[in-house]
Each structure stands twice: as structure tokens, then as C-alpha cells.
């Protein structure tokens, strides 16, 4: 018993234990205190707009039409949350948003995964040109394409339909999905496939049975990022859908702040908090992958 | 013979994998670019919706030579907007991350968690909260605080210069956390022993920032700066939602190139002219992308 305890204390551990018991140092104390004070200020600035919105959403009566300013409401009420959930078509918008986002993620994967796999595994002459053209196309701000897509969709009766919007969102997300997934597919050793190939498996079988399960973490993160940007899209939705009942959550909230502004502000505040909540959760789960994924995109070649 | 059929079978296979994606991108990305290119040479507008005709480079001349049209001003605004935002973000993020990275500081995880929130908020919601909640002239939080402290209220969004500063504040609030998280991540990957040996050699910690920290985080910093530059250049939500919403304009005449092209297409319905400005914007962005690729290769 004594022996094992002795073994566990390796030199590194001893050093670590010494470090935590460092003697009190006045200089360090003031340095850390100053940093904490500064960081507290930064954090308050970061949180203030959200705390303020929460205050507006919870304040009873019309929080806006009172010139006395207070961050924390004196009377708390859930009335505005009730209004947005029951009187406004919030639930309808939520369902619409889910249809649009899930449709977009699924469609982007159906088209994007095979393409990403081909760009990762097939060798052909113009492969690098293809990939470079994709990057240049990705530079095009999608908002500028709106008039052209409107005219195109008018011909095919795709205005005012979810199919139309899903096509637009898919087209916009495909390049990101292809690049992101190709990068991950590249990191999967090709030997696994060669073994399956010798056993007579087809490429499609390999893709579905070997590559997709192995790349599942990357696929999930990519899917969540597509989900987020579709969930937050409003400008195409308000221009391509004519009936506000059909709106997505983002388009609905946008229209809410634009009309009957003063009366709806606390309701908008409540709705915006509800709409942001799922996105915040996703960010907390995948932020580490997002940061490395986003910054790696700039250097991949 | 056998290899030839094998080869064609392989090509067929390849097209089966990539053509669905390309057809989709053809309709949603490539077609609009070609279409914009075409109508940029026409006089398509609200009076000539179907009976438009080719007018050569007229729209391009209009955009690039007539100052009063506003495109050159929007372009200039966008450049200033991009440069100032990226510069302020990088400097502030470096300072904050260096503070966070001080050895033995507790609560790093807490601060990081708080900083994720503004970054994660949907940008349209952030912009609308700032516009309707914080910047509102009479009921807004900022003027509320100013009033409580006995100051005059400020018209945050109504004059050009103030509106530019206000938009920058919002962009900073939204985008700075990402830069901090990136740089802080880079700093954490630097081995402390570099600093220890530097300080043994008599290097001050201020000098160490320039000779150790910056060169070592460069591979992480550069892609983040490039990404932020493009995002800031293409930023639409902040300027549009804060200042230029249809029917809710604040009076400030600030446009970035993207909001300018959008306004000319959808508000004043000058499609031909808007298309010409869109093509110019695309050329600028493609040029920047190519420069960036060249630069990365040269590294």
C-alpha cells in the first residue's frame, strides 16, 4: 500500500504540487486582481445587451414606454412569453424553421457527401481547378444573387414554396460542406477502403458503410453549422415567402420588429431569446470544432 | 481495351458523384453570376422590366465615375469599415488574450464561456436588439444610462459619423469574442518554457510578446484575420438592420457595397445598375481571394 503511493508521486507531480502552494506574492496578487477587474468589465459589456433584453422580456406592462430606466424589472411577468407563444404564430414559425433547416441539412448532405468523397478519393486531371473554382464561387455574396434567383424561380413556380428556399439554402451551403468534409475524408486512411475493395465492395458501399460512419463526428459538426446559418437566415425568407404565416422564425421575428414597433418590442425580446436558445446550446457543444474548422478553412489548399 | 473501358467507367463514376452538387450550384450560384453579368449591360429597371435593351458599359461608367451615384462612397466606406474593424479587433483581442493567458490566473474557463455568448447570438437578433433596445433615442438603454448620469442624450443612429461608430460598436461586440477565442487558443499552445528561458536571458515580458508570442501564434492568427476581413467586408446584417431597413431608415446615409447593391435592386429597382455594382463587388472579392491564396502559397 505504501509502495504504490510512493510510485504515484512522480517528479512532475511533485513539481505541480509545489507550484500550487507557491508563496503569497504581492505583485502577482495585484496583477491578477487588475486582470479580473478588467475581464469583469469585458464580460459585463458582453452580457449587458442580453441581460437588458431579458429584463425587457420579463418586465410587466409595456417596458418600453417608460422613460425611467432600470436594467432589472421590479415586477416580473411571463406575459410576453405567453403572448409570443400563444397569440403570435411562434410555434408555426418554429415548425417552419425546423422544416427548412432539416430539409437543407439533409439535402446538402445528399449532394455534398458524394462530391466531397469524390474530391477526396478520385484522382483526375482538373481536380485542383475544380476545388479552386469552388472557393472563388464561395466568395460571391449570396445576397447579390437574389434578383437572378427570383427570376429563375418564377419560371419554375418555386416562389412562395419551402422547396424553393431549401434549394437556395442548399446551393449556398454546398461549397462549405464539400470543402469541410473533403478535408476530413482526406484524413481517413485509404487502406481501409483498399481492403474492402479487394473483398469486392463497390465505391458506394464503401462510402456508406465505411467512410460515413468514420466521418460521423465531422458530418455532425458540419450539419450543425449548416443548421445554424439556415436557422438565422431571414432576408431570402421575407422576399420569397408572401404569407407571414409561412415565415421561418428569423423572418417572423424580423417582421415582428418592423411592424407595430412599440407595442411588440417586449414580445420581440421574448421571442428573440427563445429563438437564440437552441443556437447558443449548439455553439457551446461544438465551439471547439468550429474555431479550428473555421480558421483551418483559410489555409487549406 | 480493358483499361479503356475501365477508364471510362471511372469517369462515369466520378460524374455520378460530383454532378448533382454541380447542377445545384449551377442553378443557385453560377447562374445568378452569369445572369447579373448579362443584365449589368442592360437598362433593366422598374420602367423596363421586360423590354430592356443592351446599353454597353453605361452602368459601369455610372458606378465608377459619377461620385453622386454613391457607389464609390459606399466602396470607400466599406474599405474604412473593414480596415478599422479588423485592426481594432486584432489589437483588442491580443490584449485581452494576453491578460487571460497570465500564468496561474483562475477563472479562464468562466471568462471564455461568457465570451461565447455574443459570438453565438444570431447576428440579426443582435443587430435588432442593439438597434431597438440599446440605441433607441428615447427609450434605449444607452441614452437611459446617459440620462441617469445627467448627460445629454445622443442620436446614435441618425448622423453619418455617429451611425458608423455605432455600427462598429455592434460589430465589435459580435465579432471580438471569436478573435479572442482564436488568439487565446493559440497562446495556450505556446510552451511556457520559451518564456522561462527568455526571462533567464534577461528578456522583458513586453519584449517577449513581440519576439516569442506573435511569431508563434502567426499560423493561427493569419487565417483568423483573413476570415474576419472577408466576413467584415461582406457584412450586410449590421448596416442594413441598424440603418437601412425598408421603411425604417434612420436618416444616416451609410452604405457598404452590399447594402448599396441590395438597395438599388430592391428599393429603387435599378436592376441593371445594381447588377453592375454586384459584378464589381464580386471582382474585388475574387481579386482579394486570389491575393490571399498567392500569399499563403508564398509562406
Image (cartoon, coloured by chain):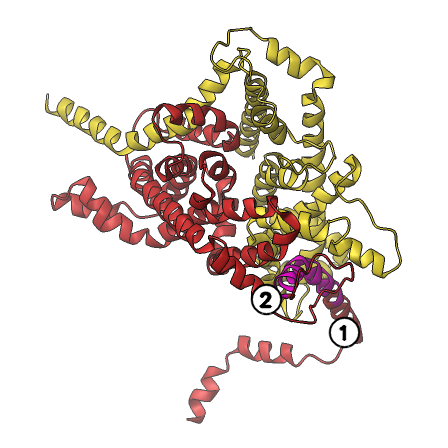
Q: Position of residue A297 (x, y in %)?
A: 48, 41
Q: Is residue B101 visible?
A: no
Q: Nearer the viewer, mark 1 or mark 2?
A: 2
In the image, taking residue A57 as reference, residue B154 lies left or right, namely: right
> Depth check: B186 or A79 in front?
A79
Q: Which residues are magenta?
A: A37-58
Mark 1–mark 2 distance (CA, rounded to whole Å): 19 Å
Which residue, given by chain and number where applicable, does mark 2 sit on?
A: B109
Q: Is residue A206 visible?
A: yes
Chain letter matching colour yellow:
B
Q: Position of residue A242 (x, y in %)?
A: 45, 36
- Looking at the image, which residue is at 16% across and 41% down? A202
Chain A, hue in figure: red
**Residues behind callouts 1 and 2 on a single chain:** no
| Label 1 packing within 10 angstroms: few (<14), some (14-19), many (20+) | few
> Depth check: A222 or A301 in front?
A222
> Depth check: B175 or A278 in front?
A278
Which residue, given by chain and number where applicable, does mark 1 sit on?
A: A29
Whether the magenta-drawn stretch holds residue A47 is answered as yes
Numbered marks: total: 2
Chain under numbered label 2:
B
Q: Quadrant of the N terminus of chain A?
A: bottom left
- Looking at the image, which residue is at 45% across and 84% down? A7
Residue extending farthest to the bottom is: A1
Q: Quadrant of the C terminus of chain A?
A: top left
- Looking at the image, which residue is at 61% across and 55% down? B118
Q: Position of residue B197 (x, y in %)?
A: 67, 60
- Looking at the image, which residue is at 22% across and 26% down? B11
Amino acid at each position: 500500500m505504501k509502495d504504490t503511493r510512493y510510485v504515484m508521486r512522480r517528479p512532475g507531480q511533485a513539481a505541480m504540487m509545489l507550484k500550487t502552494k507557491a508563496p503569497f506574492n504581492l505583485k502577482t496578487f495585484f496583477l491578477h486582481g487588475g486582470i479580473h477587474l478588467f475581464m469583469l468589465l469585458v464580460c459585463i459589456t458582453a452580457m449587458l445587451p442580453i441581460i437588458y433584453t431579458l429584463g425587457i422580456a420579463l418586465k410587466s406592462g409595456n417596458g418600453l414606454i417608460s422613460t425611467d430606466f432600470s436594467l432589472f424589472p421590479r415586477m416580473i411577468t411571463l406575459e410576453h412569453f405567453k403572448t409570443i407563444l400563444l397569440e403570435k404564430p411562434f410555434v408555426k414559425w418554429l415548425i417552419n424553421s425546423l422544416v427548412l433547416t432539416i430539409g437543407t441539412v439533409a439535402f446538402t448532405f445528399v449532394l455534398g457527401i458524394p462530391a466531397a468523397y469524390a474530391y477526396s478519393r478520385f484522382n483526375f486531371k482538373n481536380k485542383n481547378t475544380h476545388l479552386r473554382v469552388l472557393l472563388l464561387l464561395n466568395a460571391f455574396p449570396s445576397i447579390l444573387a437574389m434578383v437572378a434567383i427570383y427570376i429563375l424561380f418564377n419560371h419554375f413556380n418555386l416562389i412562395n414554396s419551402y422547396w424553393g428556399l431549401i434549394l437556395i439554402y442548399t446551393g449556398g451551403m454546398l461549397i462549405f460542406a464539400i470543402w469541410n468534409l473533403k478535408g476530413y475524408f482526406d484524413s481517413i486512411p485509404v487502406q481501409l477502403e483498399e481492403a474492402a475493395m479487394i473483398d469486392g465492395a463497390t465505391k458506394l458501399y464503401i462510402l456508406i458503410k465505411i467512410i460515413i460512419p468514420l466521418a460521423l463526428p465531422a458530418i455532425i459538426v458540419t450539419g450543425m453549422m449548416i443548421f445554424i446559418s439556415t436557422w438565422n437566415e431571414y432576408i431570402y425568407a421575407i422576399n420569397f415567402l408572401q404569407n407571414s404565416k409561412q415565415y421561418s422564425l428569423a423572418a417572423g421575428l424580423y417582421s415582428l420588429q418592423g411592424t407595430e414597433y412599440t407595442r411588440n418590442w417586449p414580445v420581440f425580446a421574448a421571442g428573440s431569446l427563445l429563438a437564440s436558445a437552441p443556437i447558443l446550446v449548439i455553439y457551446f457543444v461544438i465551439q471547439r470544432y468550429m474555431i479550428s474548422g473555421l480558421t483551418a478553412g483559410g489555409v487549406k489548399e | 481495351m480493358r483499361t479503356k473501358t475501365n477508364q471510362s467507367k471511372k469517369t462515369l463514376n466520378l460524374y455520378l458523384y460530383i454532378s448533382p452538387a454541380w447542377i445545384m450550384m449551377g442553378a443557385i450560384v453560377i447562374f445568378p453570376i452569369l445572369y447579373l453579368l448579362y443584365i449589368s449591360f442592360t437598362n433593366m429597371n422598374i420602367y423596363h422590366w421586360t423590354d430592356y435593351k443592351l446599353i454597353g458599359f453605361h452602368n459601369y461608367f455610372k458606378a465608377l465615375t459619377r461620385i453622386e451615384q454613391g457607389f464609390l462612397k459606399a466602396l470607400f466606406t466599406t474599405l474604412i469599415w473593414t480596415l478599422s474593424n479588423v485592426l481594432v479587433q486584432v489589437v483588442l483581442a491580443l490584449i485581452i488574450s494576453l491578460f487571460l493567458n497570465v500564468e496561474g490566473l483562475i477563472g479562464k474557463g468562466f471568462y471564455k464561456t461568457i465570451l461565447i455568448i455574443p459570438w453565438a447570438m444570431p447576428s440579426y437578433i443582435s443587430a435588432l436588439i442593439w438597434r431597438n433596445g440599446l440605441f433607441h433615442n428615447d427609450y434605449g438603454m444607452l441614452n437611459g444610462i446617459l440620462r441617469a448620469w445627467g448627460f445629454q442624450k445622443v442620436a446614435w443612429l441618425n448622423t453619418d459619423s455617429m451611425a458608423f461608430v455605432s455600427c462598429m460598436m455592434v460589430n465589435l461586440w459580435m465579432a471580438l469574442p471569436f478573435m479572442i477565442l482564436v488568439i487565446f487558443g493559440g497562446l495556450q499552445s505556446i510552451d511556457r518554457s520559451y518564456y522561462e528561458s527568455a526571462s533567464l536571458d534577461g528578456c522583458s515580458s513586453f519584449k517577449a510578446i513581440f519576439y516569442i508570442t506573435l511569431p508563434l501564434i502567426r499560423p493561427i492568427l493569419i487565417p483568423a484575420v483573413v476570415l474576419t476581413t472577408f466576413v467584415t467586408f461582406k457584412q450586410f446584417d449590421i448596416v442594413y438592420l441598424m440603418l437601412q431597413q425598408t421603411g425604417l431608415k434612420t436618416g444616416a446615409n451609410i452604405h457598404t457595397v452590399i447594402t448599396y447593391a441590395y438597395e438599388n435592386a430592391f428599393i429603387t429597382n435599378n436592376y441593371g445598375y445594381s447588377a453592375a455594382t454586384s459584378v464589381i463587388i464580386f471582382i474585388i472579392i475574387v481579386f482579394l481571394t486570389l491575393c490571399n491564396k498567392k500569399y499563403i502559397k508564398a509562406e
